[in-house]
């Protein structure tokens, strides 16, 4: 499963403007379902996009007064 984490990290590294270590953390979140605690806004936004349906995170951002160009993230915690 570690190879899937690394593949996921390289895949997202080529698509997003993130540090590679953040991409590895993202890989662990996606592949193994590990919750990630970070203050990195870009990583939080990416995690919120994959953890929540787009309609939910877009509604959350707009209710908070943010636009799609704001560099923020929402941390999603599994219940």
Image (cartoon, rainbow, N blue to C red):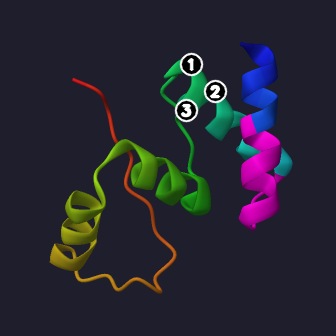
Q: Which is nearer the eye, 49 or 78?
A: 49
Dot 1 and dot 3 residues touching (CB under 8 Å) = yes
Depth check: 3 or 65 in front?
A: 3
Answer with the quarter of the image where residue 68 lies: bottom left
Residue 25 place in picture, x, y as percent: 68, 35
Q: Which residue has dot 3 on it?
A: 30
Give the residue displayed 48% in from the left and 59% down from the top: 45
- Name the residue carrying label 2: 28
1 and 2 marks in contact (CB < 8 Å): yes
How far from the left and from the top, in percent, is residue 46? 53, 55
Cβ atoms under marks 3 and 2 closer than 8 Å: yes
Q: Magenta residues?
A: 8-19
Task: Specify the principal SS of the magenta part.
Answer: helix
Q: In the image, what residue occupies the spot 31% across and 82% down?
A: 66
Q: CA distance from mark 3 to mark 2?
A: 6 Å
CA gap, disc 1 to disc 3? 6 Å
Q: CA distance from mark 1 to mark 2?
A: 5 Å
The verdict on residue 55 being magenta is no
Answer few, some or many: residues within 10 Å of disc 2's Cα (few below 14, many 20 plus, some between 14 and 19): many
């Amino acid at each position: 499963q570690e190879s899937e984490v690394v593949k996921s990290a390289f895949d997202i590294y080529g698509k997003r403007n993130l540090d590679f270590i953040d991409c590895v953390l993202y890989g662990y979140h996606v592949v193994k379902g590990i919750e990630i605690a970070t203050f990195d806004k870009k990583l939080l936004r990416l995690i919120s996009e994959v953890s929540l349906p787009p309609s939910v995170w877009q509604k959350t951002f707009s209710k908070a007064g943010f636009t799609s160009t704001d560099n923020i993230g929402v941390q999603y915690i599994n219940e």
